[in-house]
Amino acid sequence: MLKINNLCKSYSTPQGEMDVLKNLSLDIQAGEKVALVGESGCGKSTLLHVIAGLEPIQAGSVKVGGTDVAALDEAGRAALRRENLSLVFQQFNLITSMTVADNLSFEAQLAGRYDPDWTNELSDRLDLSELMHRYPEQLSGGQQQRLAIARSFAAKPSLILADEPTGNLDEANSDIVLDIAFELVAQTGCTLVLATHSSRLAKRADRILRLSGGQLL
């Protein structure tokens, strides 16, 4: 599902080039639940953004389901995100002008895979059914987080990239939401890459990858 070879990524700073990812290589199989851990600023979010085609690849290669991300133009990368993968951002990235119902269905409609029964199931399982007519600003942080997670599954993507997906929930609710997310991964057969600072949550994945100094340990 995901194959990365010798990936390099750096940023320009007043002090010179700062290497974030250094010759990083990684293989993840379809259906795997992989936790990506490491200190804040170690490059977890950058790696997810590069995989999704949101940031350019400077060297090396990233293949999602056999598609070479670096070979795609902007329209191709947008199509990849629309049709093959979904993201859960730390800041939710909900559409403020849309209701909960519209936010939940939007990506699935774009992908041409909107299924009202599946959408209703997601809203029920993530306790959103009573909130469908509200707007994101009318939700708590935890409710927005659950909506972002539900939305990521709505189009049944083959790959979900989740950046601290339970960061706005307390420990008990984090466990509940992660239980549901793992059940949905098993139900849909998708692959999950979960970036988290929580070793407790990471231990629940099939595999833990530790990122340090731009490389996997």
Image (tube, rainbow, N blue to C red):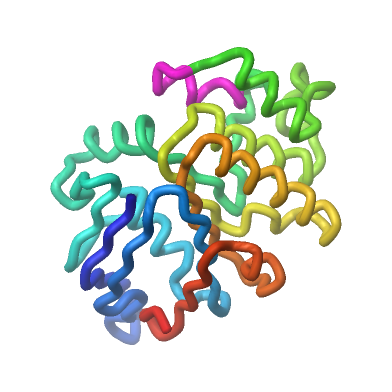
Seen from the viewer's position, the closer of residues 52 and 156 is 156
Q: Residue at the spot x=44%, y=71% of the render?
A: 43
Q: x, y percentage for residue 112?
A: 40, 17
Q: How many marks?
A: 0
Is 108 part of what is drawn in magenta?
Answer: yes
For this orientation, the residue located farthest to the top is 116
Q: Residue at the spot x=27%, y=40% of the render?
A: 77
User: Which quadrant of the view contains residue 212?
Assistant: bottom left
Image height of 172 relative to 52, above or below = below
Is residue 214 found left or right of 6 in the rendered image? Answer: right
Magenta extent: 103-113
For this orientation, the residue located farthest to the left is 71
Seen from the viewer's position, the closer of residues 184 and 58 is 184
Image height of 10 relative to 175, above or below = below
Image height of 78 relative to 132, above or below = below
Q: x, y percentage for residue 158?
A: 41, 39
Seen from the viewer's position, the closer of residues 6 and 178 is 178
Q: Main secondary structure of the magenta part?
A: helix
Q: x, y percentage for residue 74?
A: 23, 39
Q: Residue at the spot x=79%, y=35% of the render?
A: 139
Quadrant of the image containing the C terminus: bottom left
Q: Residue at the spot x=63%, y=53% of the render?
A: 165
Q: x, y percentage for residue 170?
A: 83, 58
Is residue 208 found left or right of 63 in the rendered image? Answer: right
Image height of 196 relative to 40, above or below = above
Is 131 part of what is drawn in magenta?
Answer: no
